Amino acid sequence: MRKSRLSKYKQDRLIEHFVSGSTARTAANLVNVNVKTAAYYFHRLREIIVLETQDNALLSGAFEVDESYFGGSRKGKRGRGAAGKVPVFGILKRGGKVYTQVIPNAASKTLIPIIRDKIQPDSIVYSDCWRGYNVLDVSEFKHYRINHSKLFANKHNHINGIENFWNQAKRHMRKFNGIPAEHFELFLKECEWRFNNSDPTDQIIQLRQWVKGNMG
């Protein structure tokens, strides 16, 4: 990646403000750089996060799967009814990390290949009662459902972890008052990285190392 013209001091300050969740405009004012400079630097940080967090390993254990919808000014139905919203699918390994992917729709033919690509056979998969997960009942996975119309958790049978991630991600994204569609996935992967590495000090150290290796 192109070497940054910013001083190391200003880069470090921008990284700190990025980790704190500041907008580029706020960071620019506090670090005394142009707003476009801060916005571009934040954009590069998100690109580096995507580059450095790619992982194609199959995992085993217990997982929660769920889909959610981001953006738009009105609440839509699931699947085709989610007008103006971006559908996203998530897999959370209990006691581990979350994985997210922007999807065209929440149909079974979209969701099941992602699950098979990320989760080893014979693993436990928890979901809600969305029909897109029906095929899991006769698959190589041990599938358990939670009926949200009746209860939100039944001992181990819940998807509270992945729903907690959705809430965190949406809360973070609301700060930006609208995210361009072409950049949405970068913001999504930033939220994934924040969730998987929740200590701010560790986030700063990690970003500084990655910037040194990718941007100078």
Image (cartoon, rainbow, N blue to C red):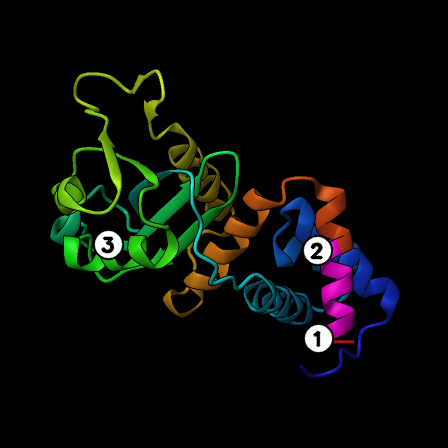
Residue shown at the point (24%, 36%) measured from the top left: 143
From the image, tell me which residue sits under label 3.
111
Q: Quadrant of residue 198?
A: top right
Image coordinates of residue 19 in percent, x first then y, are 68, 49
Is residue 39 shown in magenta?
Answer: no
Q: Quick one: label 1 or label 3, which is nearer the N terminus?
A: 3
Q: Name the residue type under label 3.
A: Leu
Q: Is residue 107 at all visible to an observer of this figure?
A: no
Cα separation, mark 2 vs mark 1, equals 22 Å
What range of the chain is rendered magenta?
Answer: 206-213
Q: Residue 214's mark?
A: 1
Quickly name the residue at label 2: 27
Label 3 to label 2: alpha-carbon separation:
38 Å
Callout 2, which amino acid? Ala
How far apart marks 1 and 3 lie (CA) works out to 33 Å
Which quadrant: the C terminus?
Answer: bottom right
